[in-house]
Amino acid sequence: MLHAQTADSVATNETEVNDKPNTDRDRFIFNIHWDGWLNDVDSPAVNAGAFSRGVGLHFFYDIPFYDIDDDSVKTRFSFAPGVGYSCSNYTNEVQFIADSLGVVTVSPLDASIDPKRNKLVLNYIEIPLEFRLNMVGNNGKSFKLAAGFKGAYMFSSHITYVGPESAVNLEEEIKYKQYRIKSLNQIQYGPTFRVGYANINLEAYYGLNSIFEDGAGPSGNPLVIGISFNPF
């Protein structure tokens, strides 16, 4: 006696598998973002420039907890913890000057100095958490919405300067890096938001902790707005 599946039953099983939203493409996410310095009320202000660009790379593990099957749209709700790295660059036209107690003040560059590069660079290890909504249509493309929270630890920082040596020696170009910037907050945390279609997303993050320690440096919190890609 022999028994085999019919062609109809095989096709039905394949459809059931393909109907589920594919969350594999939301596991590795690469982003390019603009780094804003928000709520800067000090005088002079840091005024992070338009070229304050950063990058990030994160890995998420998606944990589905509720599915809704519909003829036209398949919906999945999930929770996704992750780990990642990000680099923030704050271009500016000031000097960060620390006194003997580690208190950092900002001093504007001389008006005659136009540096090619002057930026504060902060590198973080991050732990993001997301609650996700993933909706997949019959065309296989997905609409994604994610809201969450992340914490970050700053493991390195430096200032990069490329430009004239001084206001009295504009012809002499120098380049230097200054490490171990004092009074920076090593811990950052705040809400995140991400919305996307297919493999492209818009995302935002607001840091609830100030960039420098309160009373020990210029005021201001990080605001990150960017675009991310999840090709696999």
Image (cartoon, grey):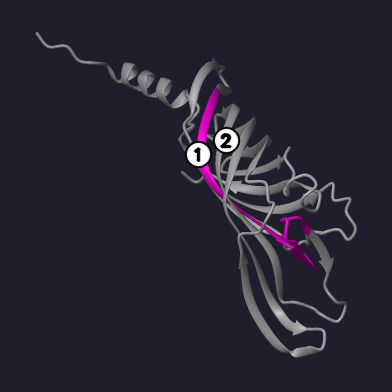
CA separation, marks 2 and 1? 6 Å
Residue at mark 1: 83
Quadrant of the frame with the N terminus? top left
Q: Residue at x 67, y 43 (%)?
A: 202
Q: Position of residue 60 (x, y in %)?
A: 49, 35
Q: Is residue 62 visible?
A: yes
Q: Residue at x 88, y 77 (%)?
A: 111
* Nearer to us in this view, 89 or 153: 153
Q: Which residues are drawn in magenta? A: 78-104
* Nearer to us in this view, 23 or 160: 160
Q: Residue at x 37, y 24 (%)?
A: 14
Q: Position of residue 130 (x, y in %)?
A: 59, 30
Q: Position of residue 89 (x, y in %)?
A: 67, 59
Looking at the image, the residue that sits furthest to the front is: 100
User: To which quarter of the image does residue 161 belong?
Assistant: bottom right
Tell me how many marks there are.
2
Relative to 33, residue 20 above or below: above
Q: Position of residue 53 (x, y in %)?
A: 67, 58
* Nearer to us in this view, 224 or 97: 97
Q: Describe the element under mark 2 as helix, strand or loop.
A: strand
Relative to 50, residue 30 above or below: above
Residue type at the position of mark 1:
Val
Residue at mark 2: 128
Q: Residue at x 86, y 82 (%)?
A: 112
Q: Is residue 100 magenta?
A: yes
The answer to whether 66 appears left or right of 116 in the picture is left
Which tag, 2 or 1, sits closer to the chain's start? 1
Q: Dots 2 and 1: beta carbons under 8 Å?
A: yes
Q: Is residue 82 magenta?
A: yes
